[in-house]
Amino acid sequence: MTATATTLVVEFLDSLTHARRRSVHTIRAYAATLHGFVAFIGQSRGEAVTQATLDDLTRADIRAWLSSRRGEGLVNASLARDVSALRTFLAWAARTHGLKRDALAGLRSPKVPRRVPRPLSPAAAKDLAQVAGDAAVQPWIAARDTAVLLLCYGAGLRISEALSLTAADLPLAETLTVTGKRAKSRVVPLLPAVREAVATYLKLSPWPAEGPVFRGAKGGPLQPELVRRAVAGARAALGLPDTATPHALRHSFATHLLARGADLRQIQQLLGHASLSSTQIYTQVDAAQLLDVYRNAHPRA
């Protein structure tokens, strides 16, 4: 008896969770895309979708699905992610269940212009971290928000990585071992200012130094949305653009290192990028900044 497509999708998602250790957000996105695809094919063909149905897929089926997704208002970037999710799933099914995947042969993903990150200036990055903390009602919360944001800017951490620190990481030393995406570990240096900010927060925190380092007002693990909300208030107070987010501090970390002569390979290791191509975008950032300076300063610009 041939397996249903839904069964295959569930098995695939389980492999992403346990074997490949993808993030919760990635699993959620893949699940929405693949279950939606199976539902579309079932409605289109008027039958339950099985492995045999997937074997029989045509390029016209894929194009019809993408057309329906575009009709829902999806832009090229979202459509490209959908195609990538489907490719990954069908490739897995081909390896593990002998599925054919002729429908994707020659199919091109929608073109997506690569966006250049918008870093902050060194002064703006420091101001953002400070003002986000100053807006808090309680001193320990102010110190907490400043410490989290300085970890993003001073060490290039993702906000999820900063919030995943536990008492086992204390006391902070000159370097910190961080576990990033796909459970990959890397070592990052910690500036004295960053270590001092975390130490100040720990002194003021009413919660015991056990479990998660950064806690919410009621003692539970600090949620990223609370940090983003503090940053939104700070950027409004400072007159910064909407692109001034916690993740922009990580971009700023990389851009400022590159501007000061750091090697791309070194930046790749500090950021925890799987490939150098992910890091090379910062060369475009640096060039864009130079162009802005030229346009603003040159009398003929």
Image: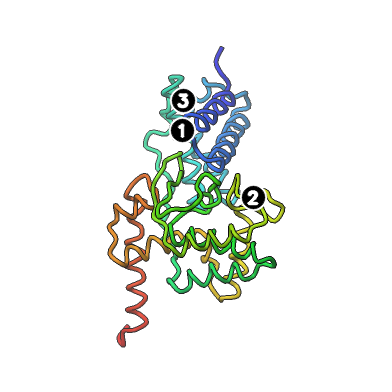
Q: Nearer the viewer, mark 3 or mark 1?
A: 1
Q: Amino acid at mark 1?
A: Arg
- The quadrant the N terminus occupies is top right
* Left or right of 286 in this view: 88: right
Name the amino acid type tagged 3: Ala
In the image, residue 245 above or below residue 74 = below
Q: Name the residue at 32% across, 61% down.
A: 283
Circle 1 packing at 10 Å, graded few (<14), some (14-19), many (20+), is few
Taking 225 as reference, is 253 left or right?
left
Check if mark 2's residue and mark 3's residue have beta carbons within 8 Å. no
Quadrant containing the C terminus is bottom left
CA distance separating discs 2 and 1: 34 Å
Check contact, mark 2 vs mark 1: CB within 8 A: no
Q: Residue furthest right?
A: 218
> Residue 93: which numbered mark, if any?
3
Q: Is residue 262 left or right of residue 164?
A: left
Mark 2–mark 3 Cα distance, whole angstroms, equals: 48 Å
Question: Looking at the image, which residue is at 29% across and 56% down?
Answer: 264
In space, the residues marked 3 and 1 are separated at their CA atoms by 15 Å
* Quadrant in which residue 105 is drawn: top left
Question: Which of marks 1 and 3 precedes in the sequence?
Answer: 1
Q: Please give the residue where the numbered disc 1 appears in the rendered image.
A: 20
Residue 185 horizontal/vertical position (percent): 41, 42
